[in-house]
Image (tube, rainbow, N blue to C red):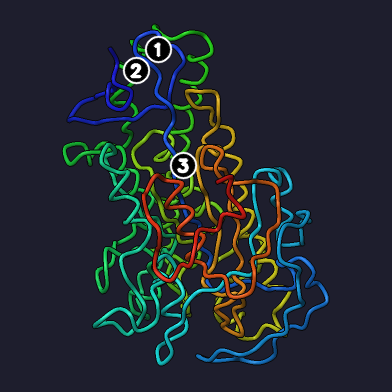
Amino acid sequence: MINRRDFLRGAGGVILSLPWFESMAKLAPAKIPKTRLAYFYVPIGVVRRSFFPGEAEAEVPEGNQGNKMASLFIPEIKTGFHDLKLTPTLEPLAAVRDKVTLITGMDRPFQHGTDVHAQCASCYLSSATPYSVENSAYPLDRTLDHIIGDQVGEETPFRTLEFSCNSHKDNKESIYFDNMSWYGTGHVAPSIRDPRKMYDRLFGTQEVQNYRNITDLVLEDARTLNRKLGYADQQKFAEYFDSIRTIEEQIDKLDAMKGELDKTLMPEPTGAYLPRGEYIRLMGDLMVVALQTGLTRVATFMVGPERWDTPFTYDSLFDKPVTHHYLSHNQTEYVEDLEKLDRFHMEQYAYLIQKMDNIVESDGTTLLHNTIFTYGSGLGDGSTHQYHDLPMIVAGTGRGQFIPGKYYHAPEGTPLANLWLSQAQAMGLNLDRFADSVAPLTSVTRS
């Protein structure tokens, strides 16, 4: 009998996880795919007029709101379901529009007297009621990913995995601006930001850190297995190894680029010059592989930090590195640049959705079908710092539990934690409440 997770072993104890193969069903009963959960977090909100349906003619906020919240006129949208019409920012989702649900109208708690941006990502998956957490300036408690990971992660090598795409090492802000996953109040779950380190964590052991290509170590054993597979599985096997090799090649490419940049004198850290699209997609590829092969069932993916004045290069969008936070506080002047950024982030999310949708699992369904993959931001608007009417998208169905292809506008005052509670229940947790939730968001589920 072949163990799906760790039958491929190479020198030094390398373990390379594999996807499901139909031929294995002849050797061992195929298991029903597990439900997975992943979060794609975008910092500093969005430009509302290009993201939210019905707001194309809405005002653009003026001036720098600093560390304060400001009111913003939001057109009234009827509560309930609507046809999903793709706004300019949502257009990259066109190929998967029937597999995503746009959710608007949801609010999250804010604890007055503390920094607006510090609570954005750090409290996003906590949603604790303000002033309910002792010894904390923020409503920050154990985050949902770890609560769920505690229950569903016993059979996986990693209960949770934390990915971040902040390549900068100049920590000008506290950890609260740059982390969304927390073991508990004041105890951050450190994210991995370097693709090489994440690759080594997923596929390497201490004994083989000096080897440059881990797949070479297991190919001999892999070929033995390959001869036992049917033709279709041999093709899938080749595709899987090609994808791993592609990841390795991309990592080598970024390593070489960083090495060359380190030799030059630049006004910003070298990380500012790494192409964002390549970097984000590479980290995303690693996350998808981890979910696909059962290394984890729960992952968080933070695209960038909150309020960080070190710039990034956004591929071909701009002729020089730019700072997302600065642009957001000057929205009237840079609204078109911000709209490009929002669309750029949506393109990365759409890329990962399509990648998941192309991975077939043991029962013929796809990885996307079996995953709850949520896009969101801690702010409804980056200039006004509003904590209400957040931009939320759920891709996948969690094995048929969520309703895709719709646009749902929640009743006024609906807590974001209602959605978190629904997702926890979909992952099998027996919870009646989570944080400041009132009830599960059953409108977007089949329950």
Q: Which residue is mark 3?
A: 288
Contact between labelled residues 2 and 1, with CB atoms less than 8 Å apart: yes
SS under mark 2:
helix
Decide if residue 263 is on the left or right side of residue 350.
Answer: left
What whole-number distance in Å separates the C-alpha atoms at marks 1 and 2? 6 Å
**46 vs 330, nearest the viewer:** 46
Residue at left 41%, top 63%? Answer: 167
Dot 2 or dot 3, earlier in sequence: 2
Q: Which residue is mark 2?
A: 222
What whole-number distance in Å separates the C-alpha atoms at marks 2 and 3? 21 Å
**321 vs 193, nearest the viewer:** 193
Q: Point out the image quarter for the N terminus.
A: top left
Residue 174, percent across and down? 33, 79
Contact between labelled residues 3 and 1, with CB atoms less than 8 Å apart: no
Residue 245, percent across and down? 44, 33
- The amino acid pointed to by label 3 is Val
Q: Which residue is mark 1?
A: 226
- The amino acid pointed to by label 1 is Asn
